[in-house]
Amino acid sequence: MVIEIANEAGRRQYIREGGEDIEAAGREIGAKPITTRCLDTEGTCRKGTWGKEFKRAKKYRTPEHRPEATRSTTLVERPRALRFQAGERVFTDGSQNKAGDIGAAVYDEKTETVELVGVRGRPTVLRAELMAILRAVQSLEGWRHLKIFTDSLTSMRLIRRWVYCPHELNEEDHIDVLDAIGEAIANRE
């Protein structure tokens, strides 16, 4: 079982009296923390292999009997230290609705504005994610350090592959948008 909590509200749900965090909550239900790393993070363009922990993992089965909680489950609110201060972050997202329409958006925490981004070309969610990242790079002031947050691991991997292994990309990988992202980064002040 993999548990990933990506937002502050989600992480706060797992804080208990005594300052326990998500890792402690996972151990409480029998989860074992493992080190994770993205495939191809060194730019070597080799296919990754599953780790030993993943291969040894047993198939998850819903417990027939859940033991009573032995500790208090009261949540404790406390301020969290942020790696990047509030106001410095920019969030991007692309999506598709039930009607099949594709769109993207950029949220700038500093100005508290949302910019909707049109998606041209082949309408895919991946293209929308990449277009949102492109717009964030283009629209932020050149002096500002980029702290762009995306939920698209595929976009991050494609950008990395564009940097380290561009010969492995093709039109299906939205190379036109990747080229535009690279150019926008290079043109920043």
Image (tube, rainbow, N blue to C red):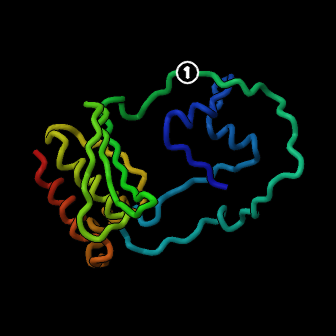
Viewer-proximal residue, 24 or 69? 69
Which residue type carries mark 1? Arg
Above or below: residue 187 compared with residue 125: above
Viewer-proximal residue, 101 or 180? 101
User: Does 157 sit left or right of 56 as displayed?
Assistant: left
Above or below: residue 175 compared with residue 6: below
Evaluate whether residue 112 shows in this view: yes
Which residue is at a point 67% across and 27% down the rendered structure image?
A: 16
Figure quadrant of residue 26: top right
Which residue is at a point 65% across and 64% down the rendered structure image?
A: 54
Which image quadrant: the C terminus?
top left
Residue 58: x and y in percent read: 76, 63
Q: In the current view of this chain or complex, which residue is farthest to the front?
A: 99
Residue 65: x and y in percent read: 89, 47
Figure quadrant of residue 88: top left
Look at mark 1 in the image and give the residue it sits on: 78
User: Does 139 sit left or right of 9 as displayed?
Assistant: left
Disc 1 element: loop
Residue 87: x and y in percent read: 31, 30
Which image quadrant: the N terminus?
bottom right
